[in-house]
Image (tube, grey):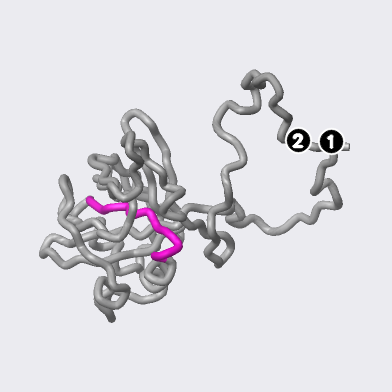
Amino acid sequence: MEMQGLGNRQEWKPGNMLYPLPVVMVSCADGKGNTNILTVAWAGTVCTNPPMLSISVRPERYSCRMIQETGEFVVNLTTERLVRATDLCGVKSGRDVNKWEAAGLTPVPAKKVKAPLIGESPVNLECRVEQEIVLGSHILFLARVVSVSVDEAWLDEKGSFHLDWAKPICYSHGKYFQMGKEIGKFGFSVAKKKTGQKSGFHGK
């Protein structure tokens, strides 16, 4: 089997090269009802039971204070159609502009938290902060997912969810990318092959 990437290695200074990453828009609200949207690439799943995720936010960001004040936020998944809005919400500050209007996004009341959902997003994860950790350049918010909303447009006739239909995007080293085609599913490497099924590897 032919392998690639076995050439000489260069050592770089320590840095965050864990790419690609999910890029999400985080909506939040303060105690007075003011709302904002923050684009976050440093987000991830941390626990299944209870369902928990994390986001890392620079303390100088306008949204950071809002999240600290209410202890709530919503993670909104992004798509190719939302890539311009996603970028705008990452480079503009809520101190200077109403991002909802500037990005053409629709705030929708959430089920369990005060922060609104982004109506154009295919999936919205309502979260409550359980722990705040000051790390250095960023503050890590560990949060429990208390409600999930899914746009019915991405459900088939059997009720199965197809996020791929929405064309999700990811982020890598300052750039946004389309997601590629499916090349396998969990457990396929050890699954018994059906009669006549060919291997996915074509080595010499």
Q: Quadrant of the N terminus?
A: top right
**Do callouts 1 and 2 mark residues in contact (Cβ within 8 Å)?**
yes
Give the image location of residue 166, x and y in percent.
Answer: 41, 54
Give the image location of residue 51, x and y in percent.
Answer: 33, 35
Residue at point 31%, 43% (across, down): 143
Q: Name the residue under label 2.
A: 201
Q: Is residue 74 magenta?
A: yes
Image position of 67 (left or right of 13): left
Residue at point 35%, 60% (across, down): 25
Q: Which of 142 and 22 is in front in this view?
A: 22
Residue at point 42%, 71% (across, down): 84
Q: Is residue 159 magenta?
A: no
Q: Furthest residue to the left?
A: 32
How crowded pointer 2 is (Cα within 10 Å; few <14, some 14-19, many 20+) is rated as: few
Choose mark 1 or mark 2, whichever is in front: 2
Determine whether the residue tagged by mark 2 lies in a helix, strand or loop: loop
| First in sequence: mark 1 vs mark 2 | 1
Residue 138 visible in the snapshot:
no
Q: How far apart are marks 1 and 2 (CA)?
A: 7 Å
Residue at point 32%, 48% (across, down): 132
Disc 1 marks which amino acid?
Met
Q: Which of 104 and 112 is in front in this view?
A: 104
What span is in magenta? 72-82
How crowded pointer 1 is (Cα within 10 Å; few <14, some 14-19, many 20+) is rated as: few
Disc 2 marks which amino acid?
Phe
Give the image location of residue 90, x and y in percent.
Answer: 40, 69
Q: Mark 1 points at which residue?
A: 1
Q: In which quarter of the image is residue 195?
A: top right
Q: In which quarter of the image is residue 97?
A: bottom left
Residue 176 visible in the snapshot:
yes
